Image: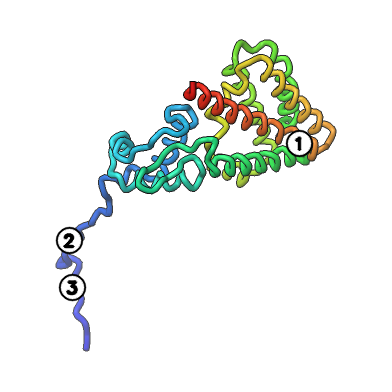
Amino acid sequence: MATRTRPMSQRSTKVSKVIRLRTPDARVSALGIARATARDIERGVYQPGSRLREQELADKFKCSRAPVREALRVLESQGSVVIEPMRGARVATVEDASFYEVFLIRRALAGLIIQQVVKAPSSAAKEEFVSRARALTEAAETCPDGHVFAGRIRRTIQIMQKVAQTPRTLHLIRSLTFGYLAFQDDIVATKKSRRAHAKLWLRIAKAVENGQPDVARSAMDELFDFAFEYVAEMKSAKVANLAD
């Protein structure tokens, strides 16, 4: 049986109705909330142990509590948040097992990165990294405070990451945000601590020049251990003050 085809002039010009699959929360993703909250934790907006109330975060990001709950679960998986039954979420503290576990993972990944820097072929970026790492010795004496010195360290780390060419490892480290950056300026607040850091960076620079990946990794491990000891001591001091 033949099928009759309508001429173009007789075909319907009615446009199909498009149903927008968009909710009021569509512009606010759980991942975006997680990232923003993680940055606030890093910057000390939320102190270790602080409660993260769902409704307050929902009001802040102008969304419902559903994406907030998902964001908190993301942060929990990264070790920056602890979700307690009947009590809700709070920022992790140094006493939490997740805090130390994330610290160990970051420490191990940073060790892998510096080993790759040592093994990387000669380049202008590699020479710049060695130069910046060496320059921290003088900076430890001349920088007026921990904030300025920490800025020098961050720039040195940026060059280190460029030389390493390990994007997947960097992605893993960045996904585990909590524990170090939140205290970085304070860790090198004194000239004594700046000198200790500079000494370790100098050891790393020499190891890179001499092609010694294990030596470089050992010094990187010590940098992380120094940071963790500082955080632990700071927490102990706060507890002691509360006891008084």
Q: Is residue 187 left or right of residue 83?
A: right
Dot 1: few (<14), some (14–19), or many (≥20) neighbours within 10 Å? some
Instruction: Report the amino acid beneath label 2.
Output: Thr
Residue that mark 3 sits on: 6
Name which of mark 2 and mark 3 comes first in the sequence.
Answer: 3
Please determine whether, in this image, residue 184 is positioned above or below residue 221: above
Q: Residue at x 75, y 23 (%)?
A: 199
Residue 8 at what x, y percent from top left? Answer: 20, 67
Q: For this rendering, which residue is in front, 108 or 127?
A: 108
The chosen color scheme is rainbow
User: Farthest residue toward the right?
Assistant: 210
Residue 218's disc number: 1
Quote the CA–CA distance across marks 2 and 1.
72 Å
Dot 3 falls on a residue whose secondary structure is loop
Dot 2 falls on a residue whose secondary structure is loop
Quote the CA–CA distance across marks 2 and 3.
13 Å
**Mark 2 or mark 1: which is in front?**
1
Residue that mark 2 sits on: 13
Name which of mark 1 and mark 3 comes first in the sequence.
Answer: 3
**Mark 2 or mark 3: which is in front?**
2
Residue 125 at what x, y percent from top left? Answer: 71, 31
Dot 1 falls on a residue whose secondary structure is helix
Residue 188 location, quadrant: top right
Q: Residue at x 67, y 10 (%)?
A: 142
Dot 3: few (<14), some (14–19), or many (≥20) neighbours within 10 Å? few
User: Farthest residue toward the bottom?
Assistant: 1
**Mark 1 or mark 3: which is in front?**
1
Q: For this rendering, which residue is in front, 102 or 16?
A: 102
One can see residue 158 in this view: no
Residue 94 at what x, y percent from top left? Answer: 54, 35
